[in-house]
Image (tube, coloured by chain):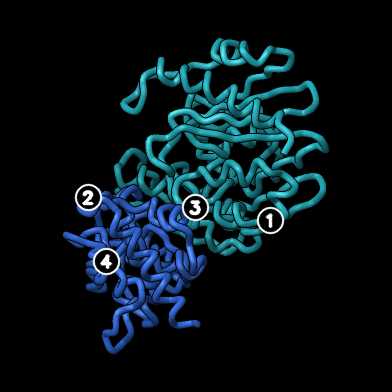
Chain colours: A blue, B cyan
Amino acid sequence: MTEELLEVRLRVNGVAHDLRVPARRLLSDALRHDLGLTGTHVGCEHGVCGACTVLADGRPVRACLMFAVSAVGLELTTVEGLADVDGTLSNVQQAFAECHGLQCGFCTPGFLTTITAGLRDNPQPTHDEARDMIAGNLCRCTGYQNIVKAVERAAELGAGETS
Amino acid sequence: MKPAPFAYVRPGSLADALSALAGDPGAKVLAGGQSLVPLLSMRLAAPSTLVDINGLPGLDAVTVTADGVRVGALARHADVLAHDEAARVQPLLRLALSHVAHATIRNRGTTVGSIVHADAAAEMPVVLTLLGGSVEVAGPSGTRTIPATDLYVGPLETCLAQDEIATTAFFPALAPGARVAFAEIARRHGDYALVGAAALVDGDSVRVGYVSVGDVPTVVDLTGVPLNEMAATALAQLDPADDIHATAAYRAQLVRVLTERVVTEARTDD
């Protein structure tokens, strides 16, 4: 059986892409395989690990729990869209570098997108709120301590910009 | 781990969605997909057609009146959770929704979808049942309202027909003077609860709904039962089971702890 391909226009990091994909193409696979945006990582592929988290209209969602065809009309942001165009790291990325918030880096894209949205909604989280912000993402290397520090450091960097 | 092939339609009207469902007995509705997509990826389900209702107009509303909270089929858990008026009229919504998965899942998953997915390990089916809510359903022959008490017929099974779509859920307002509480125990925050409990105390009336202790969402009437006998009374009507997450004995212990905890909390003046 030849599988039907559907025309899909995805907007990713401000750029429109026209794809032909089967309906069952997961958004995570469309980003990685069809668009070559391999920054979005695929871990568990059933919504538990958070590695594939991207922003849809600014809200974190699991790319492995959506079909590319369902993402039509959404403004998607992947980890590739977080730094400035000149390569300057975002506050969250800078904070991860400073705080040693990653080791192997597999989970990092999901953390970066999640925290970017989390700090936008709550720019000055308490320690507990910082922990809660990352509760939906798994990391097997760091033990989370430095990731929580990075959330707090990114909040500090953000506060420095607005004061 | 990829879904099996399926045909995909994204109708722009409820009528088109209903005819697409009626046109294929193997068709399923896709809303938030946070439960359905994993089932597809693990090939535990393989519908021949997915009817994506995310393009239907007007279904994302959360409408609050003095009578209660009406939640449209495309309202995300996060939208309902953030709705201050909804939390004021029926506080149990916010208490329970904060326990539904993780924030990222709540951004996409829908409350109505969770209700008709009918997982007895999920919070919102129990909340709807405890509050005496209902689901409005559209089908080929019109709409009907199904009380939550009639909705759940088995594990992951409601009385909805294959060609029907749940369009809204209605959660009645909290009666003046009535109180609610919610608590659950999970190994990690955001995981499925090993056991959860929601209490509704209204004068002498005491009812407690339980998460993850049976095949269907279960509410037990504990009116007139002394506090220290409530858990035993509840356990006589519940069916805690063994699985890889907890033994039946441990779940029964959690029923004892949580029953007392939520009833005491609901009875305490704030």
Q: Quadrant of residue B246?
A: top left
Find residue A99 and name its label: 4
Quick check: A5 above or below A65? below
Residues marked 3 and 1, same chain: yes
Q: Residues within 10 Å of mark 3 (few under 14, many from 20)?
A: many
Q: Chain of mark 2?
A: A
Residue B66 picture location, percent across and down: 82, 48
Q: Is residue B157 visible?
A: yes
Q: Chain of mark 4?
A: A
Q: Nearer the viewer, mark 2 or mark 3?
A: 2
Secondary structure at badge 4 equals helix
Q: Nearer the viewer, mark 1 or mark 4?
A: 4
- Residue corresponding to mark 1: B84
Secondary structure at badge 1 equals helix
Distance in Å between CA atoms under marks 1 and 4? 36 Å
Residues marked 1 and 4, same chain: no
Asked whether disc 2 touches disc 3, contact meaning CB atoms under 8 Å apart, the reply is no
Residues marked 4 and 2, same chain: yes
The amino acid on which the numbered mark 2 sits, given as a three-letter code, is Arg
Q: Residues within 10 Å of mark 4 (few under 14, many from 20)?
A: some
Distance in Å between CA atoms under marks 2 and 1? 37 Å
Residue in front for this viewpoint, B188 or B55: B188
- Residue corresponding to mark 2: A140
